[in-house]
Image (cartoon, helix red, strand yellow):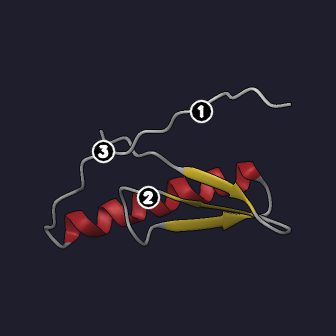
Amino acid sequence: MHRFLVVIEKAKGNYSAYSPDLPGCVATGATREDTEKNMYDAIEMHVRGLEEDHLPIPKSTSVAEYVAVRTG
């Protein structure tokens, strides 16, 4: 099993997603839930394509953190 970080961003009227560890693997959707499902499908297809082409599946090296700062 492989795990990949997915970044989901709100755009004007929809959402978009990408994985820093899988360049070119992106998805969009009308809602966050749609985008998550579409990204899951995109990653699954991307990894399957790598396997079919006998290419290595990248190791996930990306991490994410929230940083809290005081304002005002």
The structure residue drawn at horizontal position 43% and vertical position 58%, both measured from the top left corner, is 43
For mark 3, what is the residue?
61
Alpha carbon of mark 1 to alpha carbon of mark 3: how far? 17 Å
* Disc 3: CA contacts within 10 A as few (<14), some (14-19) or many (>=20): few
For mark 1, what is the residue?
66
Quarter that holds the N terminus: top left
For mark 2, what is the residue?
43
Q: Are marks 2 and 1 in contact (CB under 8 Å)?
A: no
Choose the circle earlier in sequence order: 1 or 3.
3
Residue 67 position, x and y percent, is: 60, 31
Q: Is residue 47 left or right of residue 8?
A: left
Q: Secondary structure at mark 3?
A: loop
Foreground label between 2 and 1: 1
Q: Is residue 52 left or right of residue 39?
A: left
* Disc 2: CA contacts within 10 A as few (<14), some (14-19) or many (>=20): many
Choose the circle earlier in sequence order: 2 or 1.
2
In front: 69, or 40? 69
Quarter that holds the C terminus: top right
Alpha carbon of mark 2 to alpha carbon of mark 1: how far? 24 Å
Query: Label 3 sits on what residue type?
Result: Thr
In front: 9, or 14? 9
Q: Secondary structure at mark 1?
A: loop
Choose the circle earlier in sequence order: 2 or 3.
2
In front: 23, or 51? 23
